[in-house]
Amino acid sequence: MTLKEKLHTTIFESETRAGKIFNIALIILILISVSAVIIESIPSVHEKYGQIFLYLELFFTGIFTIEYCLRLYSVKKPLSYAFSFFGVVDFFSIIPTFLVIVLPGAQSLLILRSIRLLRVFRIFKLGIYFDEGSSILNALIKSRYKISVFFFSIIILVTISGGLMYMVESPESGFTDIPTSIYWAIVTMTTVGYGDIAPATALGKGLASLLMISGYAIIAVPTGIVTAELTKTHVITNNACPTCGREGHAADAVFCKFCGSKL
Amino acid sequence: MTLKEKLHTTIFESETRAGKIFNIALIILILISVSAVIIESIPSVHEKYGQIFLYLELFFTGIFTIEYCLRLYSVKKPLSYAFSFFGVVDFFSIIPTFLVIVLPGAQSLLILRSIRLLRVFRIFKLGIYFDEGSSILNALIKSRYKISVFFFSIIILVTISGGLMYMVESPESGFTDIPTSIYWAIVTMTTVGYGDIAPATALGKGLASLLMISGYAIIAVPTGIVTAELTKTHVITNNACPTCGREGHAADAVFCKFCGSKL
Amino acid sequence: MTLKEKLHTTIFESETRAGKIFNIALIILILISVSAVIIESIPSVHEKYGQIFLYLELFFTGIFTIEYCLRLYSVKKPLSYAFSFFGVVDFFSIIPTFLVIVLPGAQSLLILRSIRLLRVFRIFKLGIYFDEGSSILNALIKSRYKISVFFFSIIILVTISGGLMYMVESPESGFTDIPTSIYWAIVTMTTVGYGDIAPATALGKGLASLLMISGYAIIAVPTGIVTAELTKTHVITNNACPTCGREGHAADAVFCKFCGSKL
Amino acid sequence: MTLKEKLHTTIFESETRAGKIFNIALIILILISVSAVIIESIPSVHEKYGQIFLYLELFFTGIFTIEYCLRLYSVKKPLSYAFSFFGVVDFFSIIPTFLVIVLPGAQSLLILRSIRLLRVFRIFKLGIYFDEGSSILNALIKSRYKISVFFFSIIILVTISGGLMYMVESPESGFTDIPTSIYWAIVTMTTVGYGDIAPATALGKGLASLLMISGYAIIAVPTGIVTAELTKTHVITNNACPTCGREGHAADAVFCKFCGSKL
């Protein structure tokens, strides 16, 4: 086993002992570095301890740079890794600090510092080892068409509601234009309800009530879709009948329940 | 195949190649025209680029008018189309702009411009081709009695809660009359919670707490109804096969899954 | 068939033709009279049209009084009807107007007028004819122990959260005493979120975040309970095994699945 | 039966008559004492009736101290009881009052008084007798990995959303630092929506809309997980009976429901 193979096993194969230790150490480092970015953003903290956070950041970036290089070195196709989701996340995890060093005054750039928050996505690397996560994701992927139809209907509903409220309510109540009214419709239908914009007229309140009750009941639809998908896997297979092509047969079915021919 | 038949195939039958292209082009046009209506409503945009949006609108209306006429021409029963849901939507998608041209000063009419938002409903024309959408709609239609009983109970609950709060709270807290109190009850029970009206007395807060917890738990009812309907097709009945006598067939089975004979 | 029997059939048996007409007419009257009570509560309306609403009210009360007397006359056990839920509701639907006539100045009594809102409960009389409603009610009744355990846990959770926030937050942020803090915890956990009371300290915001995410996830519990109950009825019976006494057998079960003895 | 055994039966075995009476009396006492703590926290009540509440508290603490001693005496392993969850709760239920007596001026200590709220947990002692509660808890425990994956994803989503909003919105709108922005993201995604912090820019409102709709739809995931777990016991497997060969047994079946032989 060459050094490259050993590295590959440690970095990418989390089932081995070395891989497990490497992964857990990495997760802890990611969490601490993300927490540091979050805490540093508080103005009073930044003023007082800015220097300490800069040193911390240099330390984290150093380690993540070494890790990034080792990954690029040990993987078979470095380019396809570099342009994969995790490759890009890894790159953006280290680049802001390098820019800070190279460009004078960049240290104070808020956006540069915030980009480092993307590191939190690196936790998903561990995430893929959860079987549980993949079963939820599976149910979501299987019901993606149903869910997109749902979002579709939501978008149409909030557009029409926003337009109606724009006609009914005056700009003084906050309904200054249709985009703002649609924003209000989303805030209301999802039951968030900030209260920064609220209907003032009787007709507006009536329409708002309808939208609220709709939003309250419509939540049943995505819930029903995901639940049906999560319970389905226990009994129903995906096999299509070779004769009529219809799916949805029970796991113990021998003949197609729709046309009666052998499965 | 006459021109009329060809047109009918292109406009109404989305499975053909020509039909697919026509449909997708139409959807894109609808989305752009709806976006234009939404963006134009922003006062600052309307002031600056009002002229450009007027020309855009004339262009969209021209195309939608041609489409409307072609539909009326190619369909077998033009009148029944004109008075169908989509026929009415199509008509209201073009009429505002014609009124703007004919009536002087109508261009500034807010309502006329907003009516064009109805175009968004035309996207549903595509929607019907989604099998997924129809299965959700099916579940909703099948459980329509259960859902109306649910809405019924909601209405009674908010009426009684609103009346109670009107008695308990003073008009100073915003509970000026029963309609307003019922509006507050809807805002609270659906967990929207704007905060423009909120109870001030201890008794009012207690009643509000009860309403909140009820609203929080009652959401389980429509969810349960829709989920039960969506999973129903996977439910196993206890009907025995008349040929082999074995049970455990799905509710939607037509043929026995064990021996293949008709159920 | 005596007059009494005929009346009983018309009033109480909604399946007959006369009963159906009687019921629908009654429902419409109830809805109009409830709407009148609601609209009359608006101060400006009451000032202007108070006299008209008084006459309307006298008319409604007259009809409901006749109906109440006919019910008492045609029913076999008048007393047990008078003290049943609907008997009490019927009584409170007519008594406020009589008090208004008898007592001078009582007309302006807000509470007396609001009591008439109770009439809305009379709609449930029709409600019982919905099979759908009874199946939902059945599921709720069957899961009443599970639901009460759920409410129990909610009460403990908001009590502890309210107590914690009372310790952490200052009275200036609105957390003046434990009852108010518990009220805030209910507003937050049920995701209503008025915003009249909101945490100001970092620790308070952290605790509030935990409570919000809990409330957001806990809603899954009553939903799961009701859904499980609504889907259960299709397959699982309530029959206990005569040998081991355990329930939950499938409708097609011949032998107990737990102890193997004949059901 | 010795006195110790008798005490053990009364205190710990709620199925006996004496145990039932003891338990119910205790629950009532706990509820009254918790209510007293809650009501006493209201400043005006504390000022007026502080003395009465002090005497009440001494009475409750006396009884709970006797109960605590009896439990320690009658249990077989006093130390393991003392360090169990309920042992610690019992200890913290009585200690604040003793500290108040011993330490001068401690009576006014807000935290000491609030600790007594922990008594509410003692109600769970009764809770364990509910079979219903344990079935819910069971479903939650079984789906704990799925639920933790869900919380995991929520944390990543609110971190990224908070970071984005911190970049997009100005500190004037309330987005002063990343922790505050993450707090806002939690308030928004869980659909609580206080309204103390709300986006002001168009881009911020757009991002907020996405977060709201995500939060609105994501609630389907924990609901689906818990529902799937709660309905699982009613799910039919495709295991054949080794004796009669018939399938369609429930997942929790031990004996064949058709022939009664062991599965």
Image (spheres, coloured by chain):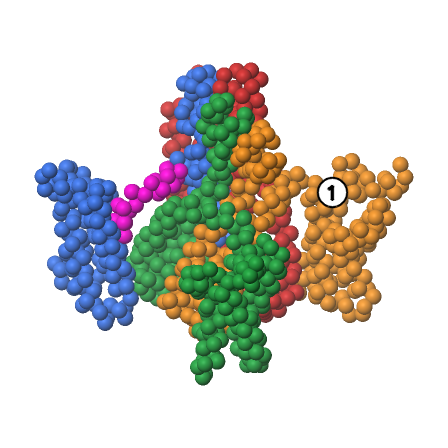
Chain colours: A blue, B red, C orange, D green
Q: Is residue A129 left or right of residue B39?
A: left
Camera sees residue C223: no
Q: Residue at x 54, y 73 (%)?
A: D62
Q: Quadrant of the N terminus of chain D?
A: bottom right
Q: Which residues are magenta?
A: A118-141
Q: Nearer the viewer, residue B67 or B191?
A: B191
Query: In the rendered structure, the residue with mark 1 lies on which chain?
Result: C
Q: Position of residue D209 (x, y in %)?
A: 40, 51
Q: Residue at x 45, y 84 (%)?
A: D104
Q: Nearer the viewer, residue C157 or D165?
A: C157
Q: Residue at x 13, y 51 (%)?
A: A66
Q: Nearer the viewer, residue A11 or C145?
A: C145
User: Which quadrant would residue D46 be assigned to in this image?
Assistant: bottom right
Q: Position of residue B218 (x, y in %)?
A: 56, 50
| Above or below: residue D96 compared with residue B142 | below
Q: Nearer the viewer, residue C25 or C116?
A: C116
User: Which quadrant would residue D112 be assigned to in this image?
Assistant: bottom left
- The residue to which callout 1 is attached is C24
Is A124 magenta? The answer is: yes
Q: Position of residue D75 (x, y in %)?
A: 48, 61
| Above or below: residue C230 compared with residue B170 | above
